[in-house]
Amino acid sequence: MLQLPLEALTRQAFAPFGMVMDRSQAELRMINGGTTQRFHALARADTSTLGGSTILSLFRSQPRAFPYAVDMMERHPLGSQAFYPLSGRPWIAVVAPDEEGRPGAPRAFPVPGDVGLHYGCNVWHHPLIAVGEVSEFLVMDRDDPGLNLEEAIYAHPFVIAHP
């Protein structure tokens, strides 16, 4: 197995895969007579291809055991997907560039419990990796009756030693 190190999560490092949704870097707008802070446009959904629509869901993810083997990736060719943690728990995002229709070498990022990520349309990523405890996420993605999931298996898994 190949070691998969955790990289520092920055907007620049994650840019090839989507957007970092960090409210500390968002445009702040005061609304509702000054009683509500709006962290404006953390992500923009890309789901309208072939008649899709944008939905919000709640995901409850079981924590992974470490060392953890990353042996597969998935992508959604018809829409983007955003994950925002609700439990305040750190989590790990694993993404990969596309190499001729298959996921290339993965990159792993530890994500703070108050930061979300928006994966671009057709970006290879691993399913949620919750750390330590059951974690809940608000998820924005595409809903339609079409096939919007592609999975690929790595010939040799990559291992995240510990969070």
Image (cartoon, rainbow, N blue to C red):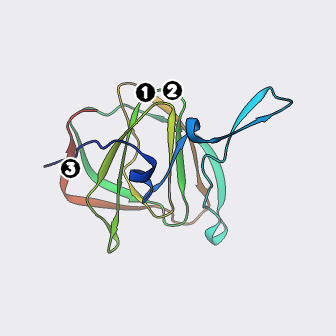
Residue receiving disc 2: 87
Q: Earlier in the sequence, mark 3 or mark 1?
A: 1
Placement of the C terminus among the 4 image quadrants? top left
Say if mark 3 contacts mark 1, CB within 8 Å: no
Dot 2: element = loop
Q: Position of residue 46 (x, y in %)?
A: 60, 61
Give the side of residue 1 with respect to residue 49, left or right.
left
Could you tell me which residue is drawn at 80 percent across and 26 percent down?
A: 35
Q: Earlier in the sequence, mark 2 or mark 3?
A: 2
Which quadrant of the view contains residue 28?
top right
Q: Residue furthest left?
A: 1
Q: Position of residue 61 (x, y in %)?
A: 44, 35
Amino acid type of disc 1? Val
Whether tag 1 and tag 2 are in contact, CB under 8 A, the answer is yes
Q: Name the image quarter holding residue 9.
A: top left
* Coordinates of residue 143 in the picture (x, y in percent): 61, 57
Q: Which amino acid type is shown beneath numbered disc 3?
A: Phe
Q: CA distance from mark 2 to mark 3?
A: 27 Å
Query: How much space separates mark 3 and mark 1, taking CA atoms?
Result: 23 Å
Mark 2 or mark 1, which is nearer the start of the sequence?
A: 2
In what element is the residue under mark 3? strand
Label 2 neighbour load within 10 Å: few <14, some 14-19, many 20+: some
49 relative position to 17: left or right = right
Per the image, the residue denoted by label 1 is: 134
The one nearer the camera, 61 or 2, is: 2
Q: Residue 158 got which mark?
A: 3
How packed is label 3: few (under 14 Cα within 10 Å), some, or many (20 or more)? Answer: many
Q: Residue at x 43, y 33 (%)?
A: 112
Q: Tag 2: residue type?
A: Ser
Q: CA distance from mark 1 to mark 2?
A: 8 Å
